[in-house]
Image: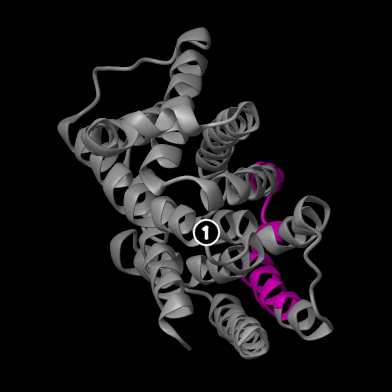
């Protein structure tokens, strides 16, 4: 793997590890889901702001109307992804919620075909299907628990669609503009959307214990800036398809962290499902690596 493909994949790996912490921080926070989402994006925006003002502000003039439309829409989609996903954690387990959110390849394969005319090989579809099967194995227990768990699973699935659309709209913009410019606009739009949502539905924005503010900040730094921002950076070189399949590693990391920090039991189905996910994702990434290397050789 040459440098042009190694660094985006390295960033993707770090990003997946970072977003695996998200569900844990949310579970440890006592604030309502929309409030958690608002402060996560608000603090992320504040952290990116100095870099945006120093380096990217002059480049804002280069954004076309289409770039603005896609960036704003991506920000709104990201906001509602967090709202739906965080709410799902109130009804179902970390494992099931994270797994359903990461069923993104189902949406990504369709979206990238219609947006960018990207075709997916039979081997890639098989390996992604294998990873998705692992996700189903992990979440199978929740489907038999209660109606509330099913409702939580439905919210998580809706959140999955939102985050896939967010990546699809960002893929084209990221190829033309810097990471700082794009992420600042997206995070700022998400923050405003979430703030309006909280105000309109009368969610409290203060009065939380000190540890909640720490978790808000950690959500901004780890899964957002080290997670989503690295995904956005990678979009310049690799497809939404690849990112969506790689994110299937997230439930494996979240299950391990939930075991150590939340005392959640690791079920046999989760171990089996996790192993299947790892095999499926590795097969998919290996197939993509082969395709990329063949394309590079043909270009030479």
Can residue 216 be found in the magenta stretch? no
Question: Which residues are drawn in magenta?
Answer: 128-156
Q: Residues within 10 Å of mark 1 (few under 14, many from 20)?
A: many
Residue 148 sits in which quadrant? top right
Q: Residue at x 30, y 68 (%)?
A: 260
Residue 41 is left or right of residue 267, and the answer is left
Q: Secondary structure at mark 1?
A: loop
Residue 45: percent from left, percent from top: 32, 32
Q: Which residue is mark 1?
A: 236
Residue 64: percent from left, percent from top: 59, 30
Q: Residue at x 59, y 82 (%)?
A: 285
Can residue 141 be found in the magenta stretch? yes
Q: Residue at x 41, y 61 (%)?
A: 20
Q: Is residue 82 in view from this perspective?
A: yes
Residue at the limit of the structure toward the front, as seen here: 300
7 shown above or below 51: below
Residue 33: percent from left, percent from top: 46, 32
Residue 119 sits in which quadrant? bottom right
Q: Is residue 103 in view from this perspective?
A: no
Q: How many marks?
A: 1
Residue 136 sits in which quadrant? bottom right
What is the basis of the colouring in this image? one colour
Question: Is most of the magenta stretch helix, strand or loop?
Answer: helix
Residue 283 is left or right of residue 85, and the answer is right
């Amino acid at each position: 793997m040459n440098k042009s493909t190694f660094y985006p994949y390295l960033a993707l790996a770090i990003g997946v590890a970072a977003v695996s912490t998200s569900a844990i921080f949310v579970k440890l926070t006592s604030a309502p889901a929309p409030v958690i989402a608002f402060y996560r994006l608000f603090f992320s925006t504040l952290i990116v702001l100095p870099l945006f003002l120093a380096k990217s502000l002059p480049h804002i003039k280069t954004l076309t109307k289409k770039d603005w439309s896609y960036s704003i829409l991506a920000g709104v989609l990201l906001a509602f992804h967090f709202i739906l996903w965080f709410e799902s954690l109130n009804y179902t387990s970390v494992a099931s919620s994270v797994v359903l959110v990461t069923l993104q390849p189902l949406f990504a394969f369709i979206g990238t075909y219609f947006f960018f005319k990207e075709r997916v090989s039979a081997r890639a579809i098989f390996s992604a299907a294998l990873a998705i099967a692992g996700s189903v194995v992990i979440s199978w227990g929740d489907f038999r628990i209660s109606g509330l768990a099913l409702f939580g699973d439905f919210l998580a699935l809706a959140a999955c669609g939102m985050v896939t659309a967010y990546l699809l709209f960002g893929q084209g913009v990221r190829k033309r503009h810097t990471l700082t410019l794009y992420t600042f606009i997206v995070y700022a739009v998400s923050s405003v959307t979430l703030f309006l949502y909280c105000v309109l539905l009368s969610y409290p924005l203060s009065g939380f214990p000190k540890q909640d503010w720490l978790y808000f900040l950690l959500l901004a730094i780890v899964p957002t800036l080290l997670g989503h921002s690295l995904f956005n950076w990678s979009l310049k070189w690799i497809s939404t398809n690849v990112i969506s399949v790689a994110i299937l590693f997230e439930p494996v990391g979240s299950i391990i962290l939930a075991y150590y920090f939340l005392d959640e039991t690791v079920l046999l189905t989760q171990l089996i499902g996790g192993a299947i996910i790892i095999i499926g994702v590795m097969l998919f990434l290996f197939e993509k690596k082969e395709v990329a290397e063949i394309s590079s050789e043909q270009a030479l």
